[in-house]
């Protein structure tokens, strides 16, 4: 079969939550007068409130990010004969009616499902590799028999009765941020690690 990969948001960037809080502290610390310190503290508290609200609403979050050397990662994958499916699809060598499609990351990349599916025959079975499971619910993905995704980290922090504190997605529920799904458009199935 071979080895295939798609890029995820962490392949493009390293997120720095510490940097977020250091910037907030710096903003308050650099204020010249007590009034400006209070004003800066109020503004930063507002930003934390917005962050908390976004987490509560399960919105996609953007933090301070440091770019990764994505080109080096791609070079290393090629050394080990890993085929990067970057908005493209390939027929599986020993199973020509089955195509493997890979789409770029929804958060840091430039996903293009139309381009990804352009060469796939209408009667072909499609397995979709996507870092973010939200993309499996978008219109062109109706042709997908099976989607394999990640991104939610299983919710990482799961609380009783609430479920996952945050899934970094907008489609999957807090109570079911990973596992098996059989509700894709067009009747497809998905496994989220």
Image: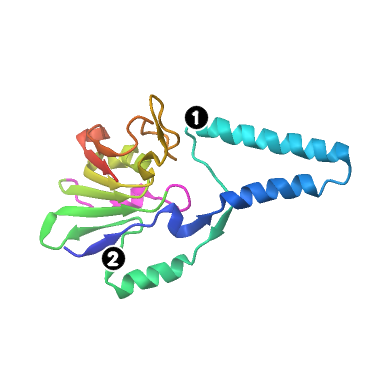
Depth order, front residue of 127/171: 171
Residue 119 visible? The answer is no
Residue carrying label 1: 57
Depth order, front residue of 148/86: 148
Residue 161: image location, x then y, percent: 38, 24
The Cα–Cα distance between marks 1 and 2, rounded to whole angstroms, is: 36 Å
Outermost residue to the top:
161
Residue carrying label 2: 83
The residue under the point 47% across, 48% down is 107
Residue 156: image location, x then y, percent: 40, 42
Q: Give yes or no for residue 108 being in the magenta stretch.
A: yes
Res 39 quadrant in image: top right
- Provide the secondary structure element on which disc 1 rests: loop
Residue 102 visible? The answer is yes
Depth order, front residue of 7/175: 175
- Provide the secondary structure element on which disc 2 rests: strand
The residue under the point 75% across, 47% down is 27
Q: Residues within 10 Å of mark 1 (few under 14, many from 20)?
A: few
Q: Which residues are magenta?
A: 106-122
**1 or 2: tag closer to the N-terminus:** 1
Res 174 quadrant in image: top left
Left or right of residue 107, residue 36 in this image: right
Residue 98: image location, x then y, percent: 15, 52
| In the depicted structure, whether residue 151 falls above or below residue 88 | above
Task: For the N terminus, give its image quadrant.
Answer: bottom left
The residue under the point 72% across, 47% down is 25
Residue 74: image location, x then y, percent: 39, 68
């Amino acid at each position: 079969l071979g080895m295939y990969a798609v890029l995820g948001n962490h392949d493009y960037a390293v997120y720095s939550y510490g940097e977020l809080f250091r910037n907030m502290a710096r903003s308050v610390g650099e204020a010249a007068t007590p009034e400006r310190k209070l004003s800066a503290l109020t503004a930063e508290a507002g930003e934390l409130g917005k962050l908390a609200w976004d987490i509560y609403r399960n919105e996609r979050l953007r933090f301070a990010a440091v770019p990764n050397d994505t080109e080096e990662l791609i070079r290393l994958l090629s050394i080990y004969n890993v085929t990067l499916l970057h908005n493209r699809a390939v027929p599986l060598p020993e199973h020509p009616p089955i195509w493997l499609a890979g789409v770029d990351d929804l958060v840091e990349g430039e996903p293009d499902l139309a381009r990804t599916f352009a060469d796939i025959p209408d009667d072909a079975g499609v397995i979709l590799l996507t870092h973010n499971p939200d993309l499996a619910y978008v219109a062109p993905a109706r042709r997908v028999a099976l989607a394999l995704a990640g991104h939610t980290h299983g919710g990482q922090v799961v609380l009783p009765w609430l479920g996952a504190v945050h899934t970094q997605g907008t489609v999957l529920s807090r109570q079911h941020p990973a596992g098996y799904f059989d509700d894709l458009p067009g009747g497809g199935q998905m496994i989220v690690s």
